Amino acid sequence: MSEVLTAPLVVEFPFTRSLGPVQSAFLTGLRERTVLGVTASDGRVVVPPTEYDPVTAEEVRDLVEVGSAGTVTTWAWNPSPRRGQPLATPFAWVLVRLDGADTALLHALDAPGPEAVRTGMRVRIRWAARRTGAITDIACFEPYDSPAGDAEPAPHDGEFADLVTGITAPARLDYTYAPGRAQSRYLRALADHKTIGERCPSCRKVYVPPRGACPTCGVATDTQVEVGPRGTVTTFCIVNIKAKNLDIEVPYVYAHIALDGADLALHARIGGIPYDRVRMGLRVEPVWSEDGRFPDHYRPTGEPDADYDSYKELI
């Protein structure tokens, strides 16, 4: 049996968003060790504050300050913290209803073990040593030996010096990818500078990269067909934003390429030609990476452009 191929894969998309007056006041308040909520139309104090009433959907602006201690309403133990989580040691995820609030805030509780956590326990905020105006300004919650009080939320004007008006929200997914039978054969063939597709026994189309089944007919494919290595640019886009950890200068071109003998276009970078001279119908060939395991990019072959009718069904 062939060795099962696996590889770590990271999908990351940090994005920047602007903040409205309510969220701006909330995050700036955390920087100043102040927790703010909003009063909804039914009189409930909502923490974290929402910009729109959860009952009527009307815009809300009535900010109030609540306490930094509260009561655990429910919890779950996390024995194996992951990258980017609040604590590096095992901790509990808790919903905490802060004194003066009517809804609960999700965060981490620093506790020695699950036996030290219970619904109804009292906790308080442990503030981060360095605060920037983010939810991480609450480093975590910690147990607090104090009875629940009858704290009343105090009106707050939401005014702070140097308001936080925007945040960068990271979105990242780390996982291990294991290709199936068809893609494993495809990847092994690339290491030999060959491109392998699979032919559907019903419609006779050749799919590259192979998927193990025909996406049109839904039947299994197991007949390998070598295609390319040359192909034709069917469509393309010009990339003007530099990606993190990608050592390619912008602008550059990413294109769909219909390899000779294939009935499905694959995508790859185009090099060896100015970005503004790439065009539909351009004939290209692969340039292999230094380790020879996959094509680094495709470059023009110097052949005449392909006729539109030869690739119009693959656009």
Image (tube, helix red, strand yellow):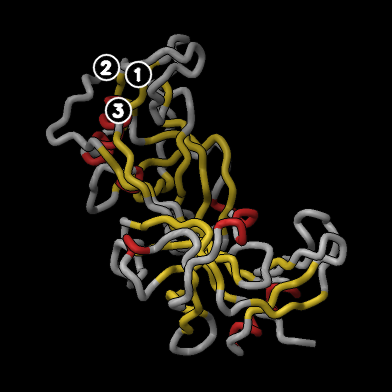
**Residue 313: in sight, yes or no?**
yes
The residue located at (43%, 23%) in the rendering is: 46
Instruction: Please name which of the two marks, 1 or 3, marks the residue nearer to the observer.
Output: 3
Q: Which mark is residue 155?
A: 2
Residue 12 versus residue 304 in the image, above or below: above
The location of residue 107, given as percent across then percent down, is 45, 44
Instruction: Please name which of the two marks, 2 or 1, marks the residue nearer to the observer.
Output: 2
Element marked by disc 3: loop
Residue at label 3?
Answer: 20
Q: Is residue 223 left or right of residue 85?
A: right
CB within 8 Å, label 2 to label 3: no
**Between marks 2 and 3, how big is the CA–CA gap?**
19 Å
Amino acid type at image mark 1:
Glu
Quarter of the figure that contains the N terminus: bottom right
The residue located at (35%, 50%) in the rendering is: 139
**Residue 81: in sight, yes or no?**
no
Question: Quarter-wise, where is residue 224 in the image?
Answer: bottom right
Upstream in sequence: badge 1 or badge 3: 3
CB within 8 Å, label 2 to label 1: no
Give the farthest residue toward the left.
161
Residue at label 1?
Answer: 152
The location of residue 61, given as percent across then percent down, is 31, 17
Q: Is residue 140 left or right of residue 288?
A: left
Amino acid type at image mark 2:
Pro
* Nearer to us in this view, 163 or 223: 223
The residue located at (47%, 40%) in the rendering is: 106
The location of residue 111, given as percent across then percent down, is 48, 54
